Amino acid sequence: MIDLSKDITFLPGVGPKKAELLKQELKIVSYEDLLYYFPYKYVDRSKFYSVRELNANMPYVQVKGRLKSLKTIGKGRQSRMTATFSDGTGVMELVWFKGHKYIKENLDTNAEYIVFGKPSIFNGVINVVHPEMERVDATKQIIRSSLQAFYNTSEKMKRGYLNSRAMLKLMQNLFKSFLNDRIQETLPTPLRERLKLAPLNEALKAAHFPNDIKQLEYAQFRLKFEELFYLQLNILKIKTRRSKTVKGHVFKIVGDNLNKFYKNNIPFELTGAQKRVIREIRHDMGSGKQMNRLLQGDVGSGKTLVALMVMLIANDNNYQACLMAPTEILANQHYETISRMLEGLNIEIDILTGSTKKSKRNELHEKLLNGELNILIGTHALIEDIVQFKNLGLVVIDEQHRFGVAQRAKLWKKNRHPPHMLVMTATPIPRTLAMTIYGDLDVSVIDELPPGRKAIKTVHYFHNKRNNLNRFLHKELNKGRQIYVVYPLIEESEKIDFKNLTEGYEYMQHAFPGYEITMVHGKMKPKEKDEAMHQFVSGKSDILVSTTVIEVGVNVTNASVMVIESAERFGLSQLHQLRGRVGRGAEQSYCILMTDYKMSDETRKRMSIMTATTDGFEIAEADMKLRGPGDLEGTQQSGLPFNLKIASLGRDSQLLQYARNVAEEILNDDPLLEKDENLMLKKQLAKLTAKKMNWSMIS
Ligand code: ADP
Ligand code: MG
């Protein structure tokens, strides 16, 4: 069996310089890394043309013939080398503007070559500039295929003579070194045969040196399946093991608090979706299993109320509950709304954030430990080790996408027996991604907005329509409504962005005299920020000019207009999130996207999607298509236990579902992969996940 962990420097053709480039640019350090560096495209090289057939309109072609004269024309930097090349049907010219030394030393006149390149015409003669050349007698010894693989290489690699072609050479050397040996298979044979998958050996060879499309697709199918399959096997196994080994607190009692709240305090009738979701959660929490549930619900769908009611269930069963939010503003808002809703009930609730004073903190710690405190709301501050509970039974994480996996894990450990976990998100994610990243969670969806909401009207304006915009804003303000104006602010262009923000603020003061205008941004001290925010939340201020600090969760029902400046700078999901700040009351709300007249195609598409739909899931799918799966995975892959080398969560969604089904089937039969026939799966899984942190205990 081949040792694939072998250092890449042992491979013929890889000197120290190339080894360094491979490592730096592609993280390739072993034979295996190289083997799994797959081509991004293939060019058909099955057909040979004759020189007579060639014309300048043809794309890349290949011709077999003899190299005749080779000469240098001109001097110094301006010089070029040319050769005549003939195949008996005609003569053409080959031209090189650089690399003269290499050509002189390596090309032999009168030898037979295969020339590959793009034909053009110069002075009435067909020529090919910088052709790829292969000696015919040499091609017998090298591994060739009719579909030639092309590999992505960086500029730096190209400068170091490691272009796609050179990578192909290395692949040839790699496969030559394997000639009499086999690559260890990574799927059990019975499974592979049942699913009609190519053996690994063949699949890898064909992925780099395919003879035809059919063979290539067969190979790719096997390799992609394998990646997605192990991804699903991993996450489903975590889920299975957890449900088998972790006991959950049993919340059996439907007690006073919940009943009283439902009778006296609840401010409105629950929507059908809220009721259903609460039922699902209650069922989990009463089952004896530890709950790990994702609550997905578009912005404004009423997740907070659900969170509150399930926290009351925990309290009724003599457990404490906590709710963690990603920002102080949001934590404060939750604290205020929830405290208000709990008036008259016998529930102790408090808040802990980064700006909680030391003395208050100490008091909180004590009340948590002796059990006096029933509900704690807070930010990341909750995670700190010093925060310990007497009996934490339920953790709710709001806007879960803003937190990392590790942070979730820490909350899990806040109790000797892990608490039930409810993670909430308003960011609709494409199904494939949800299946992969949250594949170990059970999912509840609030797919219904509270009644009486009017669909938000979204329009896209160019800057030259600002007067119209102002007239419209005046009208809304006259009706007593409040307005958000959001500016982008990112680190890379922080200074300019900040200037735009403050100028925007000044402009609004000038354009809307007599109205209270507040500015909020991330650089303000938490206290200032909260005060400013409070101005707006309490209705004292009419217009809030801000950066995206208001992005998540903020709930001001009287705000009816969201103006997004430089909307082209925001991604679709962010635009959707921002828009969700309005339309929370019964009034007609508006979202206005401001951009320059000049836009990229992508911006144009984003704007038209935003004006066409308010459905978060539709937007998420469109976002994935627009940004392309590459980008999506680039940002999301940190959430995967190993990187995908060939499959794509964007393109291969059907295969992903298929792979998940297969993995599920296997685990149903053998939950911990203990049977002999699954030994290989277990080993391979361990190998794949060894490098990354162990997240087996994480919700
Ligand atoms: P999100 O799901 O985005 O967190 P919130 O929980 O902030 O949404 O709720 C949005 C708004 O809808 C709030 O003003 C809330 O009081 C209101 N709301 C929630 N549930 C209902 C309901 N069943 N009927 C009417 N309004 C509701
Ligand atoms: Mg919310």
Image (spheres, helix red, strand yellow):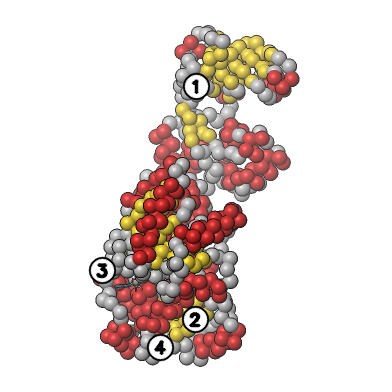
Amino acid identity at mark 2: Ile
Which residue carries the number 4 mark?
347
On the image, which quarter does residue 248 sit in? bottom left
Q: Is residue 392 above or below residue 648?
A: below
Q: x and y percent of residue 161 in the render?
A: 66, 33
Q: Secondary structure at mark 2?
A: strand
Amino acid identity at mark 3: Pro
Q: x and y percent of residue 387 in the render?
A: 55, 81
Which residue carries the number 2 mark?
351
Frontmost of labels 1 and 2 is 2
Count residues near mark 3 (Cα–Cα under 10 Å), then give few for <14, some for 14-19, many for 20+. Answer: few
Q: Name the residue located 56 percent from the left edge and 10 percent from the top edge.
A: 123
The answer to which of 652 and 215 lies nearer the viewer is 652
Amino acid identity at mark 1: Val
Q: x and y percent of residue 285 in the render?
A: 36, 78
Which residue carries the number 3 mark?
451
Count residues near mark 2 (Cα–Cα under 10 Å), then give few for <14, some for 14-19, many for 20+. Answer: many
- Nearest to N terminus: mark 2 or mark 3: 2
Whether tag 2 and tag 4 are in contact, CB under 8 A, the answer is no
Frontmost of labels 4 and 1 is 4
Amino acid identity at mark 4: Ile
Q: Secondary structure at mark 3?
A: loop
